[in-house]
Structure formats: C-alpha cells, structure tokens
Amino acid sequence: MPLNGAPGEAALALEDGSVFVGEPFGASVDVAAEVVFNTGMTGYQEVVTDPSYRGQMVVMTHPQIGNYGVSEFAEESVRPWVSAFIVRELATYPNHWAARSHLEQYLESWGVPGMQGIDTRALVRRLRETGTQRGVLRHSPRGGFSPSDLDELRAAAKLAPSVSQLELVSGVSAVLPVPTSQGEVAVLDCGAKWNIIRSLERRGIQPIVHSWQASAEEILEREPRAILVSNGPGDPAQLSGVVQELRKLLQSGVPTLGICLGHQLFGLAAGATTSRLPYGHHGGNHPVRELSTGRVTITTQNHEFQVLGETLPPESGFEVSHINLNDGSVEGLRHRELPVFSVQYHPEGCPGPQDSQGLFDDLLGIAGLR
C-alpha cells in the first residue's frame, strides 16, 4: 500500500502495446517519456537526482527500493530529474540515521509519479528484448482502468517523445553555479552530477562552472589549466553548437577530460558518429578494459548513446582507449598527441564503484595541479 494510502491504480503502457498495472505512489500526474531500467541495488536517490535521466522513466531491477529513505548526503542535483520511478516494492518503513523523509514523500514533493507492485522482471525482459521504448504512466483516481482506458494509454504511448526529439541539456546545466570568478579547472556543465564537482573539491580544486552554451573563447579567457566536459541527458547529436565550441577547446592544448555525454561530444568533435544502444547502460556493474594496459575496472554507467569507434577518422588523432566487456562498445577515447581523453562511464560513481577516481588525478597531473 502506498505510504499516503492513495486509492486507485497506476498503469504503464509501452509503445509495443504492453501494459503493466500496479499501485500508484508519488505525485498523481500523467507522464509520457522513454522507459529505461537501472540494475543498481542501492543508490536510488542518486539515480533519481542524476540530470542524465531527464526525459526518462526509470525502472529499478532490485526488488525493494526506498528502505533507507532519502537524505541530503545522497543528492546529485538540486531536485529529482526522472520523469517517473517504477519499482517492484516500495519500502514502507525506511530506517537510516541520515534519512530526512520517505522516498515517496520526496518524489511527491517534486511532482514525480511512481508505480509499484508490478513484475519488474517481466518489464525489464521486455525492454531487453525490444530495446528502450516510449511509454505513458497514468494514475487512476477512480479506482481502476477500463479496457478502453488501457487502449487509450497504448495509443498515447506511441506518441510519447523520444529523447532524440528533445533538447534536454538547457534545463539541467549550471542549475547551481559555483560562486567563483577564478578557477584552475573549468567545468563545461551539460548536466554535471554533484559528485564530479565534489571529486575535484576533494583534491583541493575549486572549479569554475560554465553553462553548456559557453563559447570556447569565454572559457579560455579565464586561462584554466584543465577543462572537464560533464555528463548530461539526451542525444549528443542535438548539441551541434557545443561540438563546434569543443573542437576549439580540444585544439587549444589545455588538458581536457570528457565524461559520459562529454565523451560522446568528444567523438562528434573528432568527426566520428554516434548511435543508440539497444537498451542503454544503466547501473554500477559494467566491466571496462583499458586497451593499453589490459586493466579491467567495474564502472558506473548511465547512457543511451555510444561513439562508433570504426567511424573515427584516422586524421583526427583520436583512438579508442577503453571497451565495454559486455558488448564491445567504446568506453573511452584519447588523442595520440594532445592532452585530451574521455570515458563513457562515470569515474565519480555515486551510486556505484569508484575504481576509476584516478582519472581525476590523471587530469590534474597532466595540468600540473598534482
């Protein structure tokens, strides 16, 4: 039973006609968005506040979610960005010393709907077999859905937007700028998770954060010693203006690191193309191999798109540096001469392993800041 005791049902319809009916929680609003799944056992608050999830409903594969509530220490942005949150079972009595509220209360306060009580394994199987689908989630205040209601939802799901049709970065970029006029590391914020900023601050760096619309000239006039291009939501092909400015930054010779969406933008700036993965990588258990050393790390990932390594022009100077051991997709790029490199995964973790935190040290070391 939902915490607030709300009557009625919730229904999720996918564009292939599949329907899942369960119990509502959170805000009572309709949502039309893409549906993706996350395999993490913990870290649900970091998931819902990750700006990269803007424009997507998230299904958690772990059977019970919310058992330690929500706290001020686990946020990755100023608010939740998921369009909706779907779980097998929402914990009724969360218990943790740092918890300030129940997950349902938190989502409801931000207008985010949720659904529980469905077979999430069946839903995830469907998404794995068919790929990421568009869907519609609706709460029924009347107590249930009629067959005609469900037919209406199926039709609406076919009209739901894809992230490739939306410009999502503007709403999540520099939502809480770092208040400083100078900084040795410039962050091009396309929707940066707070732990990227924290990872720099833990190393004694107070970065200066630039909006995604900042020009290369605007960034370089501050004379940063290093640049970081962050994660963010949506299709990198929508950001042609950012790609154009990034080409200038990469040619400037300033040591530069791209993370997740930033990595995809590196690929486009190098002249490669990007494509959509069948059902994305979302979770904290993705093995990645560094090709130069053979070293394997377990990584946190959250992305729907990939750089196609075979499309990298030889004259670009870029080469593939890391690959995913599950599907062989590109997980990193580096330039053979310039001090620039990128990774598709999240070295800052949160949630998930932080085996690759050393990448921040690599960037700062190249820049002479270590």
Image (cartoon, helix red, strand yellow):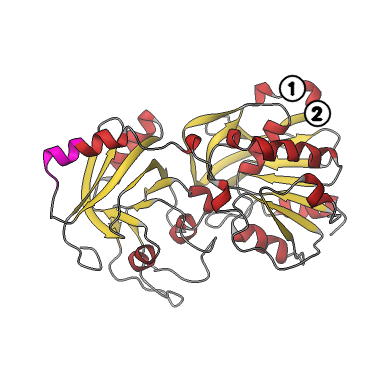
Does the magenta segment cover residue 230?
no
At 67% from the left and 22% from the top, the residue drawn is 311
Q: Which residue is mark 1?
A: 313
Coordinates of residue 218 in the picture (x, y in percent): 79, 51
- Residue 143 location (% of width, % of height): 13, 55
Residue at horizontal 13 percent and vertical 55 percent from the top: 142
Residue that protrudes farthest toward the bottom in the picture: 97
User: Is 6 rendered above or below residue 315?
Assistant: below
Q: Secondary structure at mark 2?
A: loop
Camera sees residue 18? no
Res 330 seen here: yes
Indicate whether residue 147 is drawn in magenta: yes
x and y percentages locating residue 72 in the rendered image? 50, 71
Name the residue beneath numbered marker 2: 317
Image position of 185 (left or right of 42): right
How packed mark 2 is, by other alpha carbons closer than 10 Å (few <14, some 14-19, many 20 or more), is few
Please tell me which residue lies in front, 90 or 134.
Answer: 134
Quarter assignment of residue 127? top left
The residue that appears at 72% across and 61% down in the rendered structure is 200
Numbered range of the magenta stretch: 145-151
Q: Is residue 39 above or below residue 368?
A: above
Foreground of the two, 85 or 177: 177
Q: Amino acid under label 1?
A: Pro
Quarter of the rendering occupied by the N terminus: bottom left
Main SS category, magenta section: helix
